[in-house]
Structures are given as C-alpha cells and as structure tokens.
Amino acid sequence: MRRNYIVCFIVIQCFFTSLLAQNETDFQVSVATNNPSQEINDAEAIVKVNGGKPPYQYKWSQKETPLDAKKATGFVEGLTHQVTVTDANGEEVKKTFKIKATSITEKVNSRAQPAVDFLEGILFWDPFEPLGLYDPVVYTEERPILIPDFDAKTEQKYTLQKWLIGEGEKIEKDDKIAIVQKGKEKQIPVYAPAGGTLEHTVKKGAAIFDPEDKEDVIEQNAHQVANIIYDDPQPVLYPNGDVRKNAIPFIVIWLILGSIFFTLRLGFVNVRGFKHSIDLAKGKYDNPDAPGRITHFQAMTTAVSATVGLGNIAGVAVAISLGGAGATFWMFIAGFFAMSLKFVECTLGVKYRHINKEGRIFGGPMNYLRYGLEKRNMKGAGKVLAIVFAVLGVGASFGGGNMIQSNQAFKIVSDQLPFLEGNGFWFGIGFAVLVGIVIIGGINSIAKVTGKVVPFMAAVYILGCFVVIGTNIENIGNAFHAIFDGAFSASAMKGGFIGVLIVGLQRAAFSSEAGVGSAAIAHSASKTKNPIADGFTSLVEPFIDTMVVCTMTALVLIFTGMHEVDGMGGVELTADAFGSVISWFPAVLAFAVFLFAFSTMVSWSYYGMRSWTYLFGRSKKSELIYKIMFLLFVVVGASVSLGAVLSFSDMMILAMSFPNIIGLYVMSSEIRGDLRNYMKRLRNNEIFINPKFREAD
C-alpha cells in the first residue's frame, strides 16, 4: 500500500513539474496602450506577462524608463515603439507597439517627428566617433551611494545612524549597507546599487546633509553616504540599461571653432575692442547724418532682445541639471569667444546692406553671402547659400522666434494666473495684438520698444540674482570651487569631463546665437558710415547674454542647491531656486519671462521679414503678408502643443549657421583689413564723435 502512495506522489509531482516547466517555457507578452488625452507625447503602455520565470526585466525604447518598470509613459502618439521583456531564465520576447494618434495636434506631431530626427542627425552628428578619435562610452571607476529618494529642497537633516557593512569590505548589488536617519523620526535603509569595494564617506552619527549648512547645499553630491570602488572601470547606464555615451555634436564644434578662429584671426578683438564697444553703445560715435534708421544702442538692444530669453532661464537650468556646476565654466568660456564671431557677422551685415530710395534697409547674411562671395568670383555659391539662409530664417522666425516663445509664455503666466488655464487661444490673441502693435511700425518701432524693455527686464532679473547670491555671499568661495572642480574633474554620473564640456559649450552656442547671423540683420539698420563700428557694438551682446545673464542664472541654481534636483527642468527649476529665497519672486520671474518672450518675438519678426522679402520681393505688400502670418503663428503657438513642429523650427536657428559661417570664413581677410583700417582712423581721431561727448571730454 505504501508503495502505491509513493508511486502516486511521484506521478503527481512529475505532472506539476511538467506543468510548471510548460508555463515557464510558454513565455507570452502583451502590451496594452492608452492615449489618455489629446495632448501630445503623453501616451502610456503597460506590459502583461504570462509564463516565463519571474522576476522580469522590461527594456523600453525610452532611455529614462527603469528596467523594473512594467508601465511607461510619455510616448509619441502615432510612432512605433518597442519593449523587450526578459525573464529569470534569460528568455526574451520583443514587442513593438503604436499608440494611435487621435487629435489633429497628435497627428501633426507624429508626422513632423521624422523631420526632426533627420535634422538632428545632421546638427548633432558626431564626426569624431566613427574615426575612433575618442571612446564615447562614459566610464566610471567608482559609484556614489546616495541617500535614497533624496529631496534637494528638504528642510530635514540626514544623519548616518549606523553602518551594517565595514569599510573596505566587498559588497554585492542590493546588499543592505547602512541606516540613515531623516530628521527625528524616519529611518531609511541604504542598499548597494552595484557590487564592488565599499568606501565610507561619513562617520557613524555624523550629519550627511544639513540644509542649514550652506556648504552642503552648494556642494555636488553632498547627500552621498558612501562610494563603491569597482574592480574595473564600468560603463554608466541609462535607467533602461542602455550604455550612456557622450557625443561631440557637429553644430557645437562648427560654432565654437568659428568663434576661436575669428578671435585669433582678429587679434583678440573681443578684449582690445571692449572699451570702444561700450563707448559706441553709449552713443559717443552716433552720427545723426549717417545712413540708417536706428542708433548703435538700439541695434544692440534689438539683437540682445532676440537672444536674452527663455534659453537663459530654462536652458541654463537644463544645462546645470545635466552637466552639474562645472557646465557654468564652459558656458562662460564659450561666450567669451562668441564675441568675436558676432563682431564679424554684424560688420558684414552693415557693409553689404542695401538702402532703397524710400530709405528702407535690407541687410543681413543674405546680402553678404550673395554679394560678398560674388566679389570673389563665387556668384553661384553665394546665391545658393543666401537662399538656404533665407529659407531657414523664415522657418526659424515662425518656430523658435515665435511659437515656442508664445507657447512657453502662456504656460509660465498661466501658472501664476490660474484663470488663464485652458484659454491659450485668447492669451494668444492678446499676445498677438501686443506684438502686432510693435511690429507693424517696422524696425524703428521695434528698436524703440526693445531699447526700453531690454534694459528693464535685464535689470529686474539680474537684481533678483544678486539678492539670491547676496543672501548666500559667504558661500561664494564654495560655489566657485564647485564650478571649477566640476569643470575639470566632473563625476561620470554627470557625463564625465567630455559631457560637462559639451553641455556648457552647447548651451552657450545656443544662447548667444553668435554665428547664426540673426544679429547681423538687426545691425544692418544701424545709423553709421563705418560698418566696423557695429561689429564693435555687437561685442557686448554675447557678454550680456551668456557671460552675465547665463552665469547669473547658473550661480542662483548652485547657491540654492537646485543643481542637485532630479525630475525637474527648465524654468520650473529656476523659479523654485528663486522662490526658495524670495517667496514672491516666481511671480516676478513669470513677468520677466513674458517680457523675454515678447522682446524675442518682436526682434525675430524683423529677422524673418528680411529673410522673407529676400525670397519673395521687397514690397510693402510682401512685408504685410509676412507680418500677418507671423501674428497668426503667435496664436497657434499659445493655443496648442506641437512638440516636433516646434523642435524642427527651433533647430532651423542652429542650421542658419552652416551657410553663414562658410561665408564668414571666405571673407575673413576682408574683415581683417577693414578692422586694421578702422583702428588706424580711430587712433588718428578721424572717426566722428558726437558733440555731446566732445563737450564732456
């Protein structure tokens, strides 16, 4: 009898074992999708697994979705995405899926995305990786162990209660290594994120992070508990398991090399000409009888108004969150060299301008590319480059110079004025009326407005920066130490040295627009008989935009510890930084951002209009058609979110640098000769000086 029981037990066991094995091998994956709203880029996907052996890993095509997340959000509707599910036996199932685009905006966005990918492939192509000149993979020899779920805005003190594993001992991933005390109540266990040798960085009972200690607030990774020392250097991974790589984008190299070339070619004109630049901006050399429509100062403020904007607030926050405090140093250096590039293009913008019988001015890169290259027997190339530049200029004016500005202005202002939420169309109508009042009047009206708005908005913003910095002035040494240390010995978790360098250079290149050629259009309307004089005036622009405003924003973020905040970017991060010191300043910041967006739009309307008239004729009717279209795009930008469309048109601004800088290189010897001649005349007092300044002297 007992023998029969044993046989039955074995049979039953074999049955369940085979059933279990069948379930493990019958590994099936399905993906459920959801499009929760008509907003773009908010689609969701959830994986359901049958069979296989848990635990499972979910490798999504989105790099920021963790491997243990079976749900992912933020997908572009209408495009194909992928997830690969792996079980404990190493079995893999790949699934592709598409979330249907339902709204018009979703459909437009999905159709524009391939164009964005194409342009990104050109602008952000890395020419050095295929040549094997450097290893793009980000490696690290150690990994910091940070306080879990740390909040940089916390008011609680974190203390190391006890170590569970001793100094120098070997650890494995997910080992429990320490207990951290948050405030007086909550205890937080700390687990090893990887295997290696444990290195203690805090003693038992000591404070890890104290929000009252300003040095802790400023220091990078002040919430670090310990270090893991790897046996061999390890690649840094994205949350989805992809290897993190640096890239040296071609567009950044193109702009930075141009800046350095002209700085050396013109004998550091950005340094030796800076005082003369200030004198020109002050009006010392303004000649009322000179041809043109606006003063040197108005030309400068018009150009600055187009560059000082959301990029200096939101863009810098993104750069600091990606590159850490060290990105500030490289932004400053890039801004320094950008001054020389601005000098060259603005000089040529005035030199090759055309003034018709009615006194209307047509100038900018279109003219010097066309006629400057024609002088060098490159007529065909000049025509092509000028047309390409003009087409890009029109697209950039509708996108980066218009829709993005109105879109972001609405979001920021509606955060402070809740009754505006959901009323983007009416906000756009009102915004379009304000912009229309200015741009219908032409460059004179634009120059008068920017001449008043730019100094005011810059003063308000910089004053707010000084208040934050002044509140923490005793820690200025720590802040600059964090900047220099981060610039030259940046941790791999922030992208390594190359990553920090490129983030800083990229932000500066995008911010100043030096090399893009846009400022040359504004300066072409300047009242002057000396084109080189406007080149000198333009030196101040990257100085204000990048070296002052961007640096001040970065310092505010560093002083308030916001460079350590994860999961928040752009203007929201900057607003929180100000709000942590001045509770009511986010409202002021919203007003400043509104002015930044407004001034950028009125300036870019002129840039776009000059590109438009180059392509479609210089008649007033042609200008009016463009202005009406521009105002319609103001309403569109505030009303809907067209992510890929806006991204594509914004990237057109960078693409403008391709034809522009080619022309600048060709005409570099001409600029050098003109500069030498001008400096000789200046030394011999042959340059007109405004009588008001003669009396002062």
Image (tube, rainbow, N blue to C red):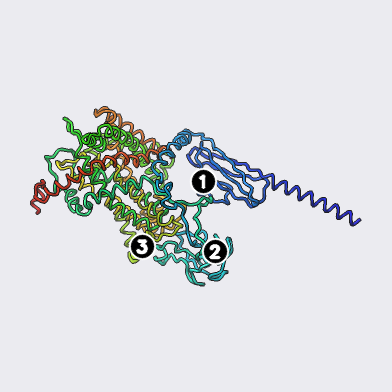
How far apart are the alpha carbons under marks 3 and 1?
34 Å
Mark nearer the N terminus (3 vs 2): 2
Mark nearer the N terminus (3 vs 1): 1
Mark nearer the N terminus (2 vs 1): 1
SS class, disc 3: helix
In the image, what residue type sits under mark 1?
Answer: Gln
How far apart are the alpha carbons under marks 2 and 1?
28 Å
| Quadrant containing the C terminus in the rendered view | bottom left
In this rendering, the answer to whether 103 lies above or below 246 is above
Disc number placed over residue 62 in the picture, else none? 1
* Location of mark 3 (residue): 479
Q: Nearer the viewer, mark 3 or mark 2?
A: 2
Left/right of residue 14 with respect to residue 630 in the rendered view: right
Left/right of residue 9 with respect to residue 573 in the rendered view: right
Mark 1 crowdedness (10 Å alpha carbons): few <14, some 14-19, many ≥20 = some
Left/right of residue 325 with respect to residue 359 in the rendered view: right
Mark 2 crowdedness (10 Å alpha carbons): few <14, some 14-19, many ≥20 = many
Q: Nearer the viewer, mark 3 or mark 1?
A: 1
Are the residues flagged by discs 3 and 2 in contact, CB closer than 8 Å? Answer: no
Between 416 and 395, the residue placed more toward the observer is 395
* Location of mark 2 (residue): 196
